[in-house]
Every structure is written in structure tokens, then in C-alpha cells.
Amino acid sequence: MPQRAIPAEPTARKSPRGERGSLIVYLALALVAFGLLAMAGVTRFGASLTSVLSPNCATAARYMAEAGLRYATARLRICTTVSQLNTTVSALNSGTFTVDQAKGLGFSLVVSYDSNYTATITATGRGCAILAPATATAAASTVNLPVVAAFASTPIDFSNLADDFMRTSSLGATNPITVDSSTNTISFGTVTGTHNAAAIWYAGNATQGCVNGNCTMDNGLRAYFDVQWDPASVADGMVFGVMSAVTNALTAVGGDSNMGELMGWAGPGTSGQGIQPPKIGIEFDTWYNSCSTTPFVAGSRCDPSNYTYGQPDHMAYVFWGSNTAPSPYNGRSGNTYDDNQHGAGNGGPTEPISSNDPDGMGSGLYGMYYAAQSNWLRSGTKYYVRYELTRLTTPSSASTATYCYVLKTWVISSTPSTAYKTVTADYDSTTYPPTIQQVIFLNSTYHVDLNKVFFGWTEATGDFAQNIKVADFVLAFKKAQPNYGTAPTGYTAYWPMFDNIGSTVTNPVSSSLNGTIYGTARWVPGIVNNNGAALYFNGGTYMSVPDNSALDLQAVGGVSLWFKMYGSNTGAWILHKGTTSSSNEAYGLGVNWNGTLRFRLRYGTNSSNYVEVTSTTVPVQGKWYHVVASWQNPGTPLTLYVNGTPEGTATVQTAQNSNGAFFLGSGSTSTSTAFTGIIDEVYLYKQVLTQANVTALATGAP
């Protein structure tokens, strides 16, 4: 799918920078072919293409569409690297290609490619310049790109386990990590060993871009493995993750002989330097450690304690803590001791917060998960883990030099499907929401440091022994950036949700349209576009923007957003202009008492002066939905679209001009109609959104 970038303001024409010579050559070839076709049909076209009054404009448009297909195909097939392919796809999607402006001839393109490097091209041709300009669409769905595919990542697995994975030295007398090449299994810990810490990192060359374990990460990675605890031997746990190969050697490991809870991820390790940032891990923690402000003290991990589940086993994303060394304690010093302390880090682009448990439920929504029993990991059950890291390689906005990292992990105990285990394509997170998720933003320095990474596992034990087996491992790096639809231009307000920290939701159109968050802001993974973040509303949080003419959608308007529900939300407002009183309301999107969606247009101050259109879809919890409402009075009924499909219409009216504020997540400053869930990519238009516009907005996936 084409990449959804933050749309630019409309321009009369765009051409890929530095590509004009190439464009002219290909278009010249296209016009030669077009001319031959035109000569063959001279009775229809006349001696030239100058007859814009010809009834055959549709034929001209079709030929232009075909020329566009040939042009795009030729451009794609000369790409030799993934980076070059991404640049070319972006250029092809960037605007309109004009063959003859005076005669109205040209084409536009929508180009995407899948994990097998098969491109899909849709070309829309234009014919004639006046009266009734015609368009025609031609599509080619199987343009293979074998040269680029050769540069794609081939999966790494345990088939050459003994040679491809290197164990670090241990803090203890013996190494607690063993490999079994006959079963392709790694065992972490031994049934008799205590006070150990070690790591095992990939050190092979099994895929394009890896040299002695130093791998180019490109756009992220996907991994799958199964994990099982020996219930008779349970201690602190382990971490799966990546560390920068710029700031670390392959021998890096954390740990402290007196603090098994560091799990080899935090602490000084054998070198005294531990594992230096940037690093991204997910811990499997089976030993409760309470909270102490001194991270040098045993029992200072701030692990979750729940009234219902007691002190549960948990999984959580961990990073590098505050990265500031506290005052020495009992001879200990260094800035690595809080690297897996939950809540450590300031949340900015230099110190992402190691996941904690703000909802007290271990829901996974904020990066920490625990099941409905206290000892679920250590019970001996085999768990199947799927991990995805999406690394967006363009800044989150034009004004910031921060880069988004989207983390998703699934944990199941039933036999996994083939799709669940396949690491050459993203898993369907719409149908199967991740068990654990988090989004972080890193500054340009740390982002560059993660161009090269080592990946593997760390583990440690304190006073007790543990034994964990990992098997059936497979990993592949993402060589392609996610491609998503480009939103139609002409919007008057847009909230892309790329802030990630603080209480302001930036509107790139104008700072006067910036939103202010009231309540606790939780930034979570959203629709993976050029920023990847979204805002979670917990039923007591809302965003508001002061009244502004850009928000007044009256005779004509369009509203577009993505959302995901948690809870029933009956009677809640997802978006609203003005308060819910009849004298102040203008328009709003909410959830009916029967669970369907409704969009209301208020055209008068009496309580009955409104029109409302409802959906047939009843949204379910934990699934993404795209919604558009559009109207024009007179001419176009109020229409509600769900996931690109029209689901209802109502007689159109003109919305009253409310002087009230604009709200996301509620219908007013009261939380009585507050929404619980995630909202992302909100657009307002003062124009009718056509079916093509709606399709473009809805083209994407979380």
C-alpha cells in the first residue's frame, strides 16, 4: 500500500526531484506508442491529439493510463537496492505527471510492493482539458522485482546454532547458557547453578547485511520462538532484545553477582560497562522485586503487584533507564543498574520509559503484560512468542528530528498458525491485536546507532536456580518501509498524533489548532505511517482545541479518523465540535446505545434540529476502524463510511456555526460522555470526500 506521509499543501504539479531527464525519456517513448495508436484510429482522433472537443477523451485517458503503467514499471525495474526502491516508490506516488498540459494529457500513480517484492501499480490517465475531462484507470498487479528481492533479508534460525550464536563470559564459575544442536534448543540457567549472568548473541553471516553478527537493521525486524520454564527451577528470568553494534561489542553483557533480577540486561557485567544504549528488549520476569529508589539495592525493579493476581510473572519492554549514575552504594556505581527498572527513564527521545503498569491490570497496552494467574510463565506451559519491531526511517515530523519505533509482541499457548510463525511479513494485528505494545521515539544519534545491531538473549540468576528452554527460533529483518495511502489534500485541520510526550497534540496546519490534553496522556502504537504513535483515552481523558474557523464545517464538510475501542463506549463521543447542548453543538461522531456508530449534524438550536446517520457495523474491542463522514448542502447526502464502505446516508443539512471548542475523546469538558480507546490520524475537510478520497484515507493497516 502507498505510504501515508504527512500530506503537503496542494501544488499545481510535482515531479520527482532529479528525475526530469528520465521522465522525459519514458514519456517520449509513451507518446510514441500513443501516437501510433492514435494514427491507427485516425478516424476517432483526427490527425493529432489537439481536438479536446473530441468525444474520444476517454480513449485518450486510457492511453495515458497505459503510458503511466509502462513508465512506472520501467522505473521500478532499474532499482537494485531496497533503499533505491523506497525512494522510487515515493517519487512515483508524489504527484501528477503531465504529458501535455495544454491538451490535458497526463497520469497519476499509486505504487506499492509486498514482502515478496512484487509491485502493484495503479495508473489513472487524464484525457482532454476542457468541457468534460475524462479519466481512466489501468492496473498491473504483478510486476516482479527480482534484483531488489536479492537484497532482502533471508530468515535466521537455529539450524546452525552452535556456530552462529556466541555465548559471553559469565559472572559465575560456569556459563549458565547451553546449546543443544541435536534439538536446536538454547537452555538458560541450570538446575544447580546460581549467581550467574550471561548473554548469547547471534554471531553469524546467514543473511544479507550481517557480518559476524553485526546486522543492518534497516526498517526493523520480526522474530518468532517458543519458550518453556522448568517449573521445578525458577528464578529471575531472561530478556530478548537488540543492542547497538556501534556502542557495544559482541561480548557485552550486564549483571551483578548479587542481583539476579538485572537479568544480564542491566548492571555492569563482566566488563564493568554492561550493555550501553541504545538497546531495546522484552523481559520475561518470573521473580517479584519490589520498588526501591536505589537501583543498586536488591529488590528494586518496581515489578507489578496486583490485588487480584498477587505478584505476577510478567513480560515488559525495557530500555536503558535514566542513563545517569546515582551516588555509589556499598561500592557499586555506574549508570546501568536501572536499565530494567520499571518506570525508569524520562520518556523523552534519549530515555524511553521502561514499561510499568499504570492501569494496574497488566493489559499490555502500555508495554507490560501479565495473565490472569500469578505464575503463568513458570507453570511449565510452552508459550509461542512473536515479536515485531518497526523502525521508521524518516523523522516523525518536519519540525523534529525524532524517529518512531513501534513494538508489538504476541504471546499464545495454543499451537500457532503458519502466519503467526512467518517472519517475512507483518502479522495481522487488526484481526489479532498484539498482547503487548509500546511506541517510543529516539533522537537522531540513537537512531543512527541502531542502524547496526546485535540480537540475542541475556539471563541471570541470584540465590535460586532457573532453567528456561528456547526453541524453533526464526528472525528476519524488515528491508522495506511500510507503505500506506496518501490522504487527500485540502484539509483544514489535521492531528497526526506524533508528539509522544507532553500534553500537546500538534496540528501541522497551524499552531492555533494545537490540542491540549486534559487528564493523563498515554501515547501508544497507532496506524503505522510516518510517525506510528496514537493517543489513548482512558475514559477520563480528552483533548480540546479552542474555537477556530478551520473547525466550522457547515454547508460542506468531511471528517476522517481511525479508532480502536476498549470497553463498550455506548453513549460516548469520539469526536465533537461544540458541547453536547443543542445550542452549542455543530457535529460529532459517537457510539449509539446499541453499539453502532453515529454521526450527528446539528442545524438548529432546538433539541430536535439535527440529522443523524448510523453505521451497520458494530465495532468490537481491540480492533482498528476507519470512519469518514461527508456532506454538502445542497447536493450530497450526509454519508457515513466505515473502513472505506458507505454504510448509511441521511438528508443533508447545514451544520450550525458553533462557537464551542473542538473535542477528541469526549463531547465536552465533562467525562460523562468520554471515550475509552485509541484515536489516530484525525482530518477535517471543508469539501466533499469522494469514494476515491475515502479509499485513500482508509488505505492502511495498523
Image: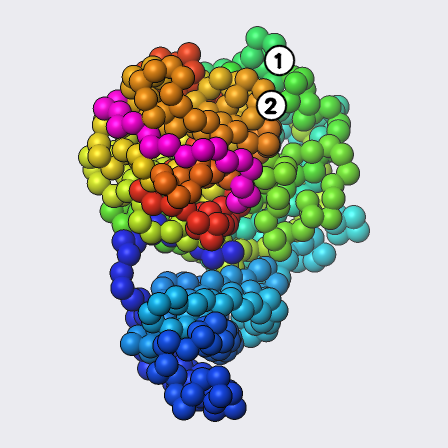
**Residue 17 located left or right of residue 646:** left
- Mark 1 neighbour class, 10 Å CA radius: few under 14, some 14 to 19, many 20 or more: some
Taking the spot 34% from the left edge, 26% from the top edge, the residue there is 603
Q: CA distance from mark 2 to mark 1?
A: 9 Å
Q: Give, as a single range, the part of the protein colored magenta.
A: 644-660
Dot 2 and dot 1 residues touching (CB under 8 Å): yes
Residue 319: quarter of image? top left
Taking the spot 59% from the left edge, 32% from the top edge, the residue there is 617
Whether residue 213 is situated above or below residue 228 in the rendered picture? below
Indicate how the structure is coloured in the image: rainbow
Residue 496: quarter of image? top left
Q: Which mark is residue 309?
A: 1
Residue 20 point in image, percent of width and height? 32, 78
Whether residue 279 is situated above or below residue 363 in the rendered picture? below
Whether residue 441 is situated above or below residue 26 in the rendered picture? above
Q: Secondary structure at mark 1?
A: loop
Q: Nearer the viewer, residue 109 or 321?
A: 109
**Residue 234 located left or right of residue 671:** right
Identify the amino acid type marked 2: Tyr
